[in-house]
Each structure stands twice: as C-alpha cells, then as structure tokens.
C-alpha cells in the first residue's frame, strides 16, 4: 500500500455543522469567535474542522490537544505561514517574513530586551508613568478606563521601548502612524494583506514614515555610543546575527513595532477588565488592599522584587485572564501531515486553539462563568493558557504581569472604584482581534479615607 | 534536592541566574534563545532559598526541585 492510500484510510477530523456555500463558517465565526469555538468543540470533540472563507481549519480542544499544538515546532506547525498579515506591518525581512534562522535570532534579541536587568528599569518606568497619570485625579471622578488604559500603556510601551526622550516628545504624528499600522491588522488582512484598500495604503505609508523616524533615533544614538538608555531599543541595536552582523534600521523598527503590538492592547484590555472586576467585587478588592499594605508597609517603593509576592492580586489577575484572555485564538499552518491520536490533519490546513473555550471547560474550571479568584488552579499546564505555552510561550508574560501588578499597586490602595453603568453592559467585545470590554468602560473612583 | 529543567520551555529570561548564580548560568547557543545551564545538579541545602526563588519566579516555570 503506498503512502497516499494509507493516509486515505486514516480518520479525518469531524466537520462542524452550518457551513455556508462560499464563506463557510466565516460569518458565525466573525460575529463571536469565542462562542463559535465552544460550539465547534461541543459538537465535534477534541478535533473540529470548520471553514473560514475557504481555509479548512481544525480547532484542537482540551489540554492534550492544546499541548500537542503548543509543543510542535515551526517546521511542522508554522506560525509564520499563519501570521503573514503582520509582514506589511512589521516590514520586510522581520520575524514572520525572515528565513527561520534569522527569525530565531530576531526573537532572541527581542527576548534579550525582557531580561532581568531591563525588567528592573521597566518597573521604575511604569511606576513613574502611573504616578504621573494619577497625579491630577483629585478626590473623585469618573473616567472611561478603556480609553485611559490605552493611553497609559501606549506611554509605558513607548517609554520602555524607545526611551524617555521619545516618550516625552510623543507626537500626534507618531500616534497617527501607529493607528494606521494597527488598522492594517484587521480581520481582512488575514485573508489577503495586499488587497487594494485605503486602509492598506495608509498602513504602507505609515510604516515607511515610522522607519524614517526610528532610523533618525538610531543614527543619533550611534553618534553618542557611550550613553546608556536601559530601554529595548538599546538592546535591539546591540543584537547581532550568528555571523556577527547587526540588525538593519528597518529590522530594528520592525522589532519595535512587533513588540508594541504584542504588548499594548493585550495589556490595556486586561488592565481595564481587572479594574472593572475589582469594582464588581469589593470584598476581593479589600483583601487585595490589605495584601498591598503588607507588601509595602516598610518601604512604599514599587520594584520588580516587591511586586513578586502578591498571591491574592496574582490569583485575581489570573481569574481575569481566565475569563477574558486577550488573545482568544492562536493559529498555525500545517506544513507536514500531523497524526493526532489516529486522526490525520493534512498539510495545508490551519490548526487553531481557543484560550477562551479552554478556560471555560467545566472539567477543569467548575462553574466556569463564575468569577472566582479563589478557585483551584488545574494541575495541567495546558488547561490555563492565557500566554500560550511550550517553546513559543509569550515571552512578555513576566513583563505583562509586572505591569498589571504595578498599576493596581498604585491605584487600589488610594482609590475605590465602582461601576457607573448597569453591570450587564460591561461585556467582552467579541468582534475585536484582541479581547477587550465593549467601550466606553466607565468607572467612578473615590479617594480612600 | 535535585534540579530538573525542561529545556524546551526556556527562553533565557535569566531570573534563575540573578537569584542563584551558584546553581544556574544562562549560556548562548548556536541559534535561538540563550538557555539555562545547571551548574550544580544537587545543590547544598544552604542554597535552598535561592533555588526555590529561581524556580518560583522563572517566567516559564522551567525549573523543578525534586526532593531526595
């Protein structure tokens, strides 16, 4: 028996019902992909094949299937082939457009910027940014925290990545370029990022201008090479390939953009949800304030070390990440046929895992829709996956948690928070690429006595 | 105690090196992330607190302590 017929005899993944003629499940999927994934899993089990406008996609559910997905390397399950929409946003030759060896080198340089020494600097930067933000709050008021956190995390991200000078001169031009790049990563870009569309033209112009702007900073810094900055740009500029050559200016710009995209809206959305859930649950909020007062009782300084031991706040943040995982869905392209427990997933298909669905699996999270920071964490590492897992786990996870804890450590001991609008109006926006509450997300704050 | 590392999960964040330099180093490799290198597989009891911190604060939970 030749290989082809052997494969033909193998079981294929069951198909999800309700596919439409041309677009498959695209409409149902786009309307609410978290819920669609849960339906697919409930109907078909561990493997569920659906159709996204022609792309056959297999959802892998449950910790075993998710572990297989997360541990399989790029040569078999490719991130690059799934995330080509990022190429015109990060620039040519950057990360998912680079040959495998260069991509690895770039990701390594990106992680270098997140190592221990840098993290200490970032903690101080974030603390300062949060202090500056709350400085004019007064005794009480009302804010749209979704919008506020988008601004705050844009400030912290640019400050940590590009340094104090850049952050302090943050221009409307930069904000508008960044906005145009973001708009270039909407859902249709994952179908074809090179269509003739005004948003894509704006994206391409924005990238060229941003490359110019960052190139100017790089040139300036190379002239003053004895100065130390302690930011990510410094690390990116020092990084080299295995042959010793440095990254080009455009590659450095690409890493800056990629890092902003990885960390910005994921953090702003999660911070908004944390504060909203704190407003909804004053009892937990009080417990966390007590914990923070203990941590900072001798010395009020927020440092990387002081933020590390906050079990109550950590459990609270984890529960927020369980119910509101910022990245709802992770994808890979199948480069070589995969056998999962006797079922064949063929080359050319896409595979996906759903953090949103996994975190609502009642086998691992009883009464899953209930917000309960005291719930037992599953032993299985692949049931709770807000940062993915395996060799490609989000390298910014420690940065993200540090930033969230730093923000809450400043806000919560000083202010109480309450919802302004009816509780049921604070919902996940399930159509966004990165999960966030439907805006505006208004909360009222009052200074604690 | 014995130290076990799951090297596939290591991304070279270097928290272990900062906490317990007697026990952990982080070394460059040919391609990909720098990786943890265990200098003492059976560290003395005196280093327990440091090793426990290294394991606990590793962002990727690479390090496990196995009791003898």
Image (cartoon, coloured by chain):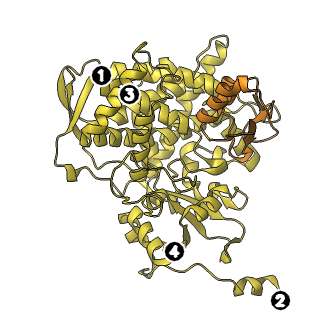
Chain colours: A yellow, B orange
Observer-side mark, 1 or 4, equals 4
Q: Is residue B19 found left or right of A39 in the rendered image?
A: right
Q: CA distance from mark 4 to mark 2?
A: 30 Å
Give the SS element for disc 3: helix
Reading the chain from its start, which is encountered first: label 3 or label 4?
A: 4
CB under 8 Å between discs 4 and 2: no
Observer-side mark, 4 or 2, equals 4
The one nearer the camera, A223 or A319, is A319
Name the quarter where the N terminus of chain A is drawn.
bottom right
Q: Which residue is mark 2?
A: A1
Q: CA distance from mark 1 to mark 3?
A: 21 Å
Q: Residues within 10 Å of mark 4 (few under 14, many from 20)?
A: some
Q: Which residue is mark 1?
A: A134
Q: Are marks 4 and 2 on the same chain?
A: yes
Residue A415: name its quadrant: top left
Q: Tag 3, which chain?
A: A
Residue A326 visible in the picture: yes
Reading the chain from its start, which is encountered first: label 1 or label 2?
A: 2
Position of residue A87 relative to residue A152, above or below, is below
Reading the chain from its start, which is encountered first: label 2 or label 3?
A: 2
* Residue drawn at (42%, 33%) of the image: A404
Reading the chain from its start, which is encountered first: label 4 or label 2?
A: 2
Image position, residue A147 (x, y; %): 30, 37
CB under 8 Å between discs 1 and 3: no
Q: CA distance from mark 3 to mark 4?
A: 42 Å
Image position, residue A107 (x, y; %): 66, 40
Q: CA distance from mark 2 to mark 3?
A: 66 Å
Q: Which residue is mark 3?
A: A291
Give the SS element for disc 1: helix
Q: Which residue is mark 4?
A: A45
Q: CA distance from mark 1 to mark 2?
A: 71 Å
Name the quarter where the C terminus of chain A is drawn.
top left
């Amino acid at each position: 028996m030749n290989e082809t017929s052997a494969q033909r005899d193998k079981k294929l993944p069951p198909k999800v019902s309700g596919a439409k003629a041309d677009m498959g499940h695209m409409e149902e999927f786009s309307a609410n992909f978290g819920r669609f994934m849960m339906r697919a899993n409930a109907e078909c089990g561990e493997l569920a094949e659906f159709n996204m406008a022609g792309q056959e996609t297999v959802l892998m559910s449950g910790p075993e299937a998710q572990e297989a997905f997360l541990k399989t390397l790029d040569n078999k399950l490719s991130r690059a082939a799934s995330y080509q929409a990022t190429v015109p946003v990060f620039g040519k030759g950057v990360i998912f457009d680079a040959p495998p060896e260069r991509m690895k080198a770039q990701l390594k340089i990106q992680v270098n910027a997140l190592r221990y020494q840098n993290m200490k600097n970032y903690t101080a930067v974030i603390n300062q940014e949060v202090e500056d933000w709350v400085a004019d709050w007064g005794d009480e008021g009302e804010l749209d925290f979704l919008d506020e956190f988008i601004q705050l995390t844009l400030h912290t991200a640019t400050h940590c990545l590009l340094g104090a000078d850049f952050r302090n001169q943050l221009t409307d031009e930069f904000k508008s370029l960044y906005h145009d790049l973001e708009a270039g990563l909407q859902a249709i870009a994952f179908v074809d990022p090179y269509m003739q569309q005004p948003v894509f033209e704006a994206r391409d112009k924005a990238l060229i201008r941003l490359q110019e702007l960052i190139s100017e900073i790089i040139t300036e810094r190379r002239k003053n090479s004895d100065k130390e900055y302690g930011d990510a740009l410094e690390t990116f500029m020092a990084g080299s390939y295995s042959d010793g050559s440095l990254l080009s200016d455009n590659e450095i710009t690409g890493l800056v953009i990629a890092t902003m995209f990885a960390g910005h809206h994921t953090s702003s959305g999660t911070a908004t949800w944390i504060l909203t859930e704190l407003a909804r649950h004053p009892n937990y909020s009080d417990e966390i304030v007590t914990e923070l007062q203990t941590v900072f009782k001798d010395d009020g300084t927020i440092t990387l070390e002081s933020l590390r031991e906050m079990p109550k706040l950590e459990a609270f943040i984890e529960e927020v990440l369980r119910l509101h995982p910022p990245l709802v869905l992770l994808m890979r392209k199948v480069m070589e046929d995969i056998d999962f427990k006797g079922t064949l997933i063929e080359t050319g298909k896409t595979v996906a895992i759903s953090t949103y669905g996994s975190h609502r699996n009642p086998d691992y999270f009883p009464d899953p829709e209930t917000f309960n920071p005291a719930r037992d964490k599953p032993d299985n590492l692949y049931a709770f996956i807000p940062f993915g897992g395996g060799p490609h786990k989000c390298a910014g996870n420690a940065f993200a948690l540090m930033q969230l804890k730093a923000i809450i450590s400043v806000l919560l001991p000083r202010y109480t928070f309450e919802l302004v609008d009816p509780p049921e109006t604070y919902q996940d926006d399930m159509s966004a690429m990165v999960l966030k509450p439907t805006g505006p997300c208004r909360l009222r704050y009052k200074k604690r006595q | 105690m014995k130290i076990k590392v799951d090297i596939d999960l290591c991304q070279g964040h270097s928290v272990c090196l900062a906490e317990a330099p007697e026990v952990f180093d982080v070394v460059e490799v040919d391609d990909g992330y720098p990786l943890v290198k265990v200098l003492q597989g059976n560290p003395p009891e005196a280093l327990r607190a440091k090793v426990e911190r290294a394991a606990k604060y590793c962002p990727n939970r690479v390090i496990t302590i196995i009791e003898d």
